[in-house]
Image: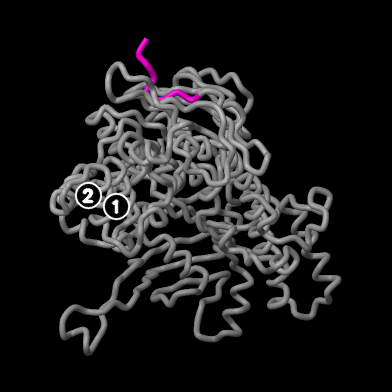
């Protein structure tokens, strides 16, 4: 039997005396693709970081044996290695790709400088050789014009290009093992597929092993050879992808596999009038013109070109597309937050310059944002957050009446003081991601809107929590007759929630129709690519 490249034996990690990783044992062979799967808090990232001793203030026991690159030499136990030995291993033998490239890359250095620094530190090459190596590493990841991109800063690249740059940096020294921690979570569905294909090709070319850390089961199906499942710091199941997905043994594994969004929406009643309608909707942003012309006038970037849609009472319109397609700009226009041309009506009323009139419309259309942690004020209590809309739209309510409405709305989204004693006086950081999203939904519902704009409402959540939030939104739609404008790049969420679909690309609506028609029988190549990439 071939010797493992890396072998973990009884790995335990504790913080302040509390153990968070409980005796994990697994191995990865040379050239193998292993996926470590679990929800947030399962311990998968801590397990990976502990191998390289990158977790601060942690007590780590067990063994993490890395096979020597030289035949006949004994493996190195990474947990017993000196810091000097680890400096030689990190980046050269084991490299890491992090989840969010914008925070992993240094914003004040060019991409080329950051990759070149790795080559100089690990191989001691000259400045010119390091720069040429950086350009070559970028070229290997398929970035167009690699020499020019090497001279750019992280903020000047798209999300997919930043992730490719991070992969180029990790692979510059041709490591034997790549730790990829949620490398595609922040990317669009087609970009996810591109990064997945890239990792597969580079893994094949370099013969390296890959440990993929993820909660995306579709990603695991398409990429990995074997899968290991973690729950609450325990390794509960491992085996080949075919075995684990085809015949899962542990209840947690079965729950993960069954957590794909399920459709549970009622058909729209015949004759239901539109609560939101757009015709010839165009949104432009001013941009400077090049040269001397920019001294006298400004140009315009058109983010949405003449879109048309109609949302009936109790219906859901899903807008799907990649970053930059214009779908979020469409949501801002629906909320009256950007100026637009053409017609856009909310329950027969149009956004305009009259602030008082807009306030009345604003009560009818509310929004739930992508990341509840950043959209909820950390300084406000639950009562203040949820009840804030009543201060604006029902200023005549007394404190007791307002508090009663807050309690009733929180109960409607599944939060009550039986579960959370002192609920109204708590702060957002005291809740999980799914619970915070329920707070965001309650904040939107309390003013009795007719339309909710859902901007990627589940993309920041784990798969099982995503399923719970979607079930909540489906139930609220049935009980309240709500209409949804659903913005997402997740085709599975569209399939589970929407009645009608708009597919957007570069500001244009390229395809529109019922969810069955668009997703099952797409006419456009772009739509087919989106559906295929979703798995």
Residue 215 appearing in the image: no
Question: Looking at the image, do the residues carrying marks 2 and 1 touch, with CB atoms under 8 Å apart?
Answer: yes
Q: Could you tell me which secondary element the residue under label 2 belongs to?
A: loop
* Dot 2 alpha-carbon crowd within 10 angstroms: few under 14, some 14 to 19, many 20 or more: some
Chain part drawn in magenta: 1-8
Q: Work out whether residue 443 or residue 67 is closer to the camera in this orientation and state it.
A: 67
Q: Which residue is mark 1?
A: 161
Residue that appears at 42% across and 56% down: 103
Instruction: Please give left or right for residue 428 compared with residue 535 in the image.
Output: right
Q: CA distance from mark 2 to mark 1?
A: 7 Å
Residue that appears at 37% across and 53% down: 322
User: Which image quarter: residue 145?
Assistant: bottom left
Residue 216 spot, x, y in % from top left: 47, 37
Q: Which residue is mark 2?
A: 143
Seen as rendered, the residue at the extreme top is: 1
Q: Could you tell me which secondary element the residue under label 1 belongs to?
A: helix
* Dot 1 alpha-carbon crowd within 10 angstroms: few under 14, some 14 to 19, many 20 or more: many
Instruction: Please give left or right for residue 294 compared with residue 535 in the image.
Output: left
Who comes first in sequence, dot 2 or dot 1?
Answer: 2
Q: Is residue 421 above or below residue 299?
A: above
Residue that appears at 33% across and 49% down: 163
Number of numbered discs visible in the structure rendering: 2
Instruction: Please give left or right for residue 482 compared with residue 192 in the image.
Output: right
Q: Is residue 12 above or below residue 30?
A: below
The verdict on residue 7 being magenta is yes
Residue 470 spot, x, y in % from top left: 60, 46
Question: Which of the image's four quarters has the C terminus?
Answer: top left
Q: Work out whether residue 53 or residue 188 is closer to the camera in this orientation and state it.
A: 53
Seen as rendered, the residue at the extreme right is: 400
Residue 250 spot, x, y in % from top left: 61, 22
């Amino acid at each position: 039997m071939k010797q493992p490249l890396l072998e973990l034996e009884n790995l335990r990690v504790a913080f302040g005396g509390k153990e968070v990783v409980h005796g994990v044992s697994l191995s990865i062979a040379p050239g193998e693709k292993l996926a470590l799967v679990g929800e947030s808090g399962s311990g998968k990232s801590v397990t990976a970081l502990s191998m390289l001793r990158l977790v601060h203030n942690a007590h780590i026991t067990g063994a993490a044996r890395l096979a020597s690159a030289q035949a006949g030499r004994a493996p190195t136990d990474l947990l017993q290695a000196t810091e000097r030995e680890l400096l030689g291993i990190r980046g050269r033998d084991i490299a890491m790709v992090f989840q969010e490239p914008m925070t992993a890359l240094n914003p004040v250095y060019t991409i080329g400088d950051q990759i070149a620094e790795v080559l100089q530190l690990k191989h001691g090459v000259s400045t010119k050789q390091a720069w040429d190596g950086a350009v070559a590493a970028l070229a290997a990841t398929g970035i167009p014009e690699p020499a020019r991109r090497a001279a750019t800063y992280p903020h000047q690249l798209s999300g997919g290009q930043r992730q490719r740059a991070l992969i180029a940096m990790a692979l510059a020294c041709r490591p034997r093992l790549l730790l990829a921690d949620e490398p595609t979570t922040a990317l669009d569905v087609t970009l996810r597929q591109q990064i997945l294909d890239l990792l597969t090709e580079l893994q094949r070319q370099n013969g390296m092993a890959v440990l993929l850390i993820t909660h995306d089961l579709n990603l695991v199906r398409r990429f990995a050879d074997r899968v290991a499942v973690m729950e609450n710091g325990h390794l509960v199941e491992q085996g080949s992808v075919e075995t684990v997905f085809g015949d899962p043994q542990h209840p947690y594994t079965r729950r993960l596999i069954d957590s794909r969004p399920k459709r549970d929406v009622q058909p729209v009643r015949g004759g239901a009038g539109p609560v939101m309608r757009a015709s010839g909707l165009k949104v432009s942003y001013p941009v400077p013109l090049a040269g001397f012309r920019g001294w006298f006038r400004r140009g315009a970037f058109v983010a949405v070109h003449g879109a048309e849609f109609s949302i009936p009472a109790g219906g859901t319109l899903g807008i799907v597309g990649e970053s930059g397609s214009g779908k979020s700009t469409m949501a801002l226009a629906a909320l009256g937050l950007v100026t637009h041309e053409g017609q856009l009506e909310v329950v027969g009323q149009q956004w305009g310059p009259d602030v008082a009139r807009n306030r009345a419309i604003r009560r009818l259309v509310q929004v739930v944002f992508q990341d509840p942690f950043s959209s909820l004020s950390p300084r406000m209590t639950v009562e203040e957050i949820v009840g804030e809309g009543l201060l604006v739209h029902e200023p005549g309510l007394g404190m007791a009446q307002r508090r009663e409405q807050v309690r009733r709305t929180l109960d409607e989204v599944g939060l009550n003081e039986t579960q959370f004693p002192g609920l109204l006086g708590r702060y957002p950081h005291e809740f999980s991601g799914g619970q915070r999203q329920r707070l965001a939904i309650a904040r939107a519902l309390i003013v009795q809107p007719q339309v909710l704009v859902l901007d990627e409402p589940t993309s920041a959540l784990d798969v099982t929590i995503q399923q719970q939030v979607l079930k909540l939104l489906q139930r609220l739609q049935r009980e309240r007759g709500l209409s949804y404008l659903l913005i997402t790049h997740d085709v599975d969420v569209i399939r589970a929630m929407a009645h009608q679909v708009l597919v957007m690309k570069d500001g244009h609506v390229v395809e529109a129709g019922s969810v069955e028609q668009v997703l099952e029988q797409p006419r456009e190549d772009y739509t087919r690519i989106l559906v295929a990439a979703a798995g």
